[in-house]
């Protein structure tokens, strides 16, 4: 139980620091956001993923946990897409961003202490990271690239919900509508994003038991350790001046939050219990990972591809607030 409390407390404190910084330094906050977003996307987050993957026990994590994470994420995202796209009639870009927000968990920072202290092993969180970074994220980033390509051809590079004007995330290296760029090239670029590449390199290092020399390993470790606080600060800054659960995106936020906090853990329990025969701490680890709140990376990715970020931001915030009581209930029931 202490691991659950510790993980959420760390996140809330750092998000609060970012919010206070944006409130106390409104003039500098926008410049800080512009600098932090590409720094995290291109440098610190890839370094963190390399560190986590290079230490993974591949044989232990790929047999059970990773398939469960993939099945659960795919089913949850599909449910969101069916309801938001089919029933609510939302455009492709917001649907893609919302589907990722409802199924992509914050395993990188909250998941690590929860897995270590509540379950006793990092295997569940490493498995989720492998599933998300090597399969789930590339799929969604490809869809995001396709949505942005369509918007570019139509001359619509503006964030549909205006989050860019509010300073949520300033995307780096975004092509103007007049640039001629093929969809294939854009998709290739999204698949070769820094996080996925770093994850692949980390898994190669783990597979062949390779260690970086100290002159390289220590700088990578320092950069990786900076990723989580920077990303949480960035998210906290984005909350300044925003009104969560705005009327224009309320239906998507409620849908995404319900799927993230309730449906996804229930799916993980069913898949783990009945398809893979898990019980005890193994089943607890699977369900706790599914109950984690939406990862701030979804907010970063959506902003990078100039998609709607208001609903993503609100799903992330509300799921973060609800994830702690949900995780405590899960721990009592399964622990």
Image (cartoon, rainbow, N blue to C red):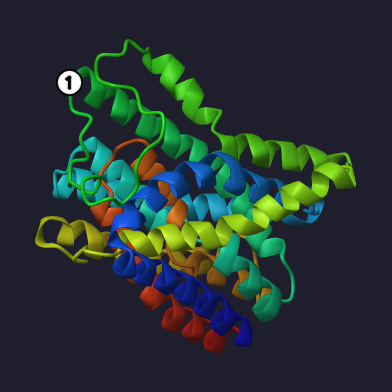
Badge 1: residue crowd in 10 Å (few <14, some 14–19, many ≥20): few
Q: Position of residue 76 (x, y in %)?
A: 39, 55
Q: Is residue 35 visible?
A: yes
For this rendering, which residue is in front, 47 or 319? 47
* Residue found 17% across the figure and 47% down from its top: 161
Q: Answer with left or right where residue 238 lies relative to residue 58.
A: left
Residue 261: quarter of image: bottom left
Which quadrant of the rendered structure holds the C terminus?
A: bottom right
Q: Quick one: SS at disc 1?
A: loop
On screen, 68 above or below 81? Answer: below
Establish if 120 lies above or below 21: below
Nearer to the camera, 1 or 23: 23
Q: Who's the residue at 28% across and 61% down the image?
A: 26
Question: In the image, is residue 281 above or below residue 32?
Answer: below
Residue 255 drawn above or below residue 130: below
Q: What's the residue at 41%, 35% (across, down)?
A: 172
Judge left or right: residue 39 versus residue 140.
Answer: right
For the view shown, which residue lies furthest in the left direction?
247
69 or 239: nearer the eye? 239
Classify residue 320 as left or right of residue 47: left
Query: Horizontal and vertical percent for residue 39?
Result: 52, 44
Number of numbered discs overlaid on the protein picture: 1
x, y percentage for residue 152?
25, 22
Residue position marked by numbered label 1 in the rendering: 154
Look at the image and tell me whether residue 319 can be seen: no
Residue 261 versus residue 54: which sits nearer the camera? 54
State the quadrant of the N terminus.
bottom right
Q: Position of residue 205 (x, y in %)?
A: 81, 40
Residue at figure coordinates x 64%, y 73% from the top left: 113
């Amino acid at each position: 139980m202490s691991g659950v409390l510790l993980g959420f407390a760390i996140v809330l404190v750092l998000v609060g620091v970012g919010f206070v910084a944006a409130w106390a330094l409104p003039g500098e906050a926008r410049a800080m956001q512009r600098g932090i977003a590409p720094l995290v996307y291109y440098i610190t987050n890839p370094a963190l993923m390399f560190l986590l993957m290079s230490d993974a026990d591949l044989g232990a994590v790929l047999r059970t946990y990773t398939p469960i994470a993939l099945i659960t994420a795919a089913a949850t995202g599909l449910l969101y897409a069916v309801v938001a796209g089919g029933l609510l009639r939302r455009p492709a870009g917001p649907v893609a961003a919302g589907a990722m927000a409802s199924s992509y968990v914050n395993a990188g920072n909250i998941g690590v202490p929860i897995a270590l202290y509540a379950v006793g092993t990092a295997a569940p969180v490493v498995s989720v990271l492998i599933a998300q970074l090597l399969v789930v994220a590339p799929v969604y980033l490809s869809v995001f690239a396709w949505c942005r390509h369509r918007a570019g051809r139509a001359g619509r590079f503006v964030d549909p919900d205006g989050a860019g004007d509010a300073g949520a995330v300033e995307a780096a290296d975004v092509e103007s509508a007049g640039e001629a760029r093929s969809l294939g090239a854009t998709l290739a670029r999204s698949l070769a994003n820094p996080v996925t590449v770093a994850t692949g390199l980390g898994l190669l290092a783990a597979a062949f038991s390779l260690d970086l020399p100290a002159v390289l390993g220590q700088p990578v470790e320092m950069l990786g350790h900076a990723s989580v606080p920077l990303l949480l600060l960035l998210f906290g800054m984005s909350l300044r001046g925003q009104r969560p659960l705005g009327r224009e995106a309320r239906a998507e936020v409620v849908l995404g939050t319900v799927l993230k906090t309730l449906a996804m853990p229930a799916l993980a329990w069913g898949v783990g219990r009945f398809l893979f025969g898990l019980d005890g701490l193994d089943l607890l680890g699977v369900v706790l990972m599914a109950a984690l709140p939406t990862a701030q990376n979804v907010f970063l990715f959506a902003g990078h591809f100039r998609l709607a970020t208001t609903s993503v931001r609100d799903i992330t915030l509300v799921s973060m607030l609800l994830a702690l009581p949900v995780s405590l209930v899960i721990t009592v029931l399964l622990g």
